[in-house]
Image (cartoon, rainbow, N blue to C red):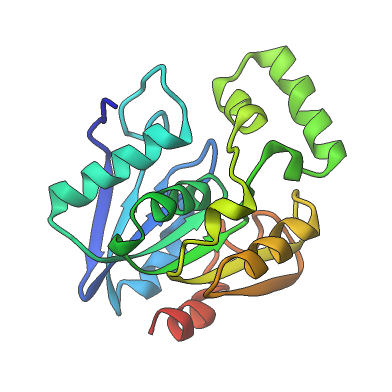
Amino acid sequence: MKTIPLHYEKSGSGRPLLLLHGNGEDHHIFDALAAKLKNHYTIYAIDSRNHGQSAKTDNYSYQAMAADMFAFLDTIGEEKVFLLGFSDGAIIGLTMAMERPSVFDKLALLGVNLKPSDFKENVLRSMARKYEETGDPLLKLMLDEPNIELEDVRKVHVETLIVAAEKDVFKPETFTDLAIAMPNARLKIMRGHKHETYIENSDLLYPDLIEFLG
């Protein structure tokens, strides 16, 4: 699979921590959080393909994005990393962990889903209507992918923090089922929050992440 160079910002010092944003965003959603985390870790805040300042292609698949990230790790020479992914970024992280779990020290998966059917019905209908109107390939990505079975994640023994919003766009069982299926996972529910409000331009998770990542 052809990979592409990715735009990223590096800051801080310490053990490497990759920050992967969600659909239609770029690495700047983590600015507030990265400003604190860089005091403890070497931060790599990355723009996924077809996002931000990274290259644009006609391949929007999560598998291609995961391949990009493996190539990125080879480029920077890091063999073992922490990863924090939000939404699409969490899907990329989980996809990578299913393929090569040995590259991760720990995973923080925020607002992750395994299938398009994990979206609440009203959200899925709204996305489908919007795609019909716009033809946006990023919307099509979410309507078609990922297609991960719970059985697929049982082999991922990486210590994992799963974070879900109380008012998330995904069905609640998406997160509880995943936390049960992953052998070394814990679940945190962000009470009163929507899918994006606890992470986008927010440092709200900082104490939890410091405690989890160590």
Task: Left or right? Give the position of 65 relative to 184.
Answer: left
* Residue nearest the observer in this picture, 119 or 29: 119
* Quadrant location of the C terminus in the rendered image: bottom left
Compared with 178, 9 (above or below) is: above
- In the rendered image, residue 64, in percent from the top left (x then y), is placed at 38, 32
Residue found 27% across the figure and 52% down from its top: 9
Number of marks in picture? 0
User: Residue 106: in sight, yes or no?
Assistant: yes
Q: Quadrant of residue 38?
A: bottom left
**Residue 205 sits above or below residue 165 on the image:** below
Residue at horizontal 74 percent and vertical 45 percent from the top: 118
Q: Residue at x 62, y 23 (%)?
A: 140
Left or right of 70 in this view: 49: right
Residue found at the very far right of the displayed protein: 122
Residue 185: image x %, image y %? 56, 73
* Res. 6 image quadrant: top left
The percent position of residue 167, horizontal first and vertical second, equals: 80, 59
Quarter of image, res 192? bottom right
Q: Residue at x 28, y 74 (%)?
A: 41
Residue 72, compared with residue 195, is above or below; it is: above
Q: Residue 2: x and y, percent?
A: 26, 25
Residue 48 shows in this picture: no
Q: Is residue 72 left or right of residue 161?
A: left
Which quarter of the rendering shows the N terminus? Answer: top left
